[in-house]
Amino acid sequence: MRQAVDVLPFQTHGPGLIEVTNAVQRWVASQGMADGLLTIFCRHTSASLLIQENAAPEVRADLLAFFDRIAPEGPDLYAHDEEGPDDMPAHIRAALTQVQLSIPLIGGQLALGTWQGVYLFEHRRRPHSRQLTVHLFGA
Amino acid sequence: MRQAVDVLPFQTHGPGLIEVTNAVQRWVASQGMADGLLTIFCRHTSASLLIQENAAPEVRADLLAFFDRIAPEGPDLYAHDEEGPDDMPAHIRAALTQVQLSIPLIGGQLALGTWQGVYLFEHRRRPHSRQLTVHLFGA
Amino acid sequence: MRQAVDVLPFQTHGPGLIEVTNAVQRWVASQGMADGLLTIFCRHTSASLLIQENAAPEVRADLLAFFDRIAPEGPDLYAHDEEGPDDMPAHIRAALTQVQLSIPLIGGQLALGTWQGVYLFEHRRRPHSRQLTVHLFGA
């Protein structure tokens, strides 16, 4: 049993779901482990993680529209607005999704379902440099 | 320190919270470990995981009603409808709950609180065969 | 590779986000590990966990207001009310946030981002004694 840890950087360009499945799988493969547990940790409070369907792109557009409806921008809704009107909705959308995901590794493969992709969920309008910490326990 | 991994199958019959606590605990007990960390991973994007009160059944009915209100079906709400009107609400409800849960194992028992049960949350109307991957690290 | 487990108690005084970052970090430091994975597990169904911005206090007030709006108290909204009008909204708010968080440990430090704090999210009005189980794997 051993462990490995690293930081994977991603550049974002406005609100949206950025698939990180391949980048994460490549890092896992480079560690040469067969079985274990991968943990992905998002070091931000206005971006988050989500596992969602990786087939129909309309699913991702509908998800974005849902989070726009449930946690809209609005000058009268929030006391915290000094970082811009998209900042507080970003914190709420991050709170409603995930900051951390752990996925079993079996026979060298992440145990994702056929239709599951791992996404970095950017909630801010401006481009951001984001970091995901990846940690792997295994053998 | 060693690890074990398996896939537990569950059959669902429409939207609802199916308690999986006992099935998961039986699998954990069969591994003969005293202390460790159990991870449950749901390999689907229209079913999810939730730890909730295992006493009053009204809690589960109220939870279902809440998710119906917050992410309703509706022909005008979503672009993605080719898999049926209950598909996109299912993806949203899965995004708002959990795809993965990790629970410490202490003295051979999962460290669940007295009122906590582990549930598979089915979001689709039709019966589905669902799979939960279980992974245990420990000694 | 070894593991450690403990239970950290916290007293709450009504709805709010109670920062537990320092208490958790002190426990981690006392284990003398350099690298590993910390898991925090909340043993309750009307309190939960959240990683959020630790700077502007308005963020926490806005988050509370959001959850009040999305899962309000209301005599006509829920069948489950025998434990008080704040009980069912508490279960819903717990379902929408986290019961468990895992955070990588790197070089003796939790891999939290600069602006991330770990919070116990109390959803009930009355004071409660809450317990967080902490589990650490590492070397």
Image: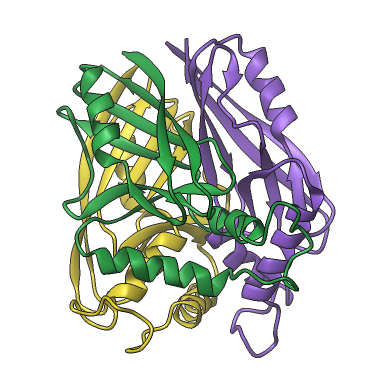
Chain colours: A purple, B green, C yellow
Quadrant in the rendering for residue C89: bottom left
Q: Residue at x 38, y 83 (%)?
A: C77
Q: Residue at x 56, y 40 (%)?
A: B44
Judge whether residue C122 can be spotted in this image. Answer: no
Compared with A131, B92 (above or below) is below
Picture coordinates of residue A117 (x, y %)? 68, 38
The N terminus of chain C sits in image quarter = top left
Compared with C25, B88 (above or below) is below
User: In this image, B15 relative to C8: left or right?
Assistant: right
Compared with B103, C69 (above or below) is below
Picture coordinates of residue B94 (x, y %)? 54, 53
Picture coordinates of residue B104 (x, y %)? 28, 35
Residue nearest the observer in this picture, A50 or B131: B131
Quadrant in the rendering for residue C127: bottom left
Quadrant in the rendering for residue B111: top left
User: In this image, C37 relative to C32: left or right?
Assistant: right
The C terminus of chain C sits in image quarter = top left
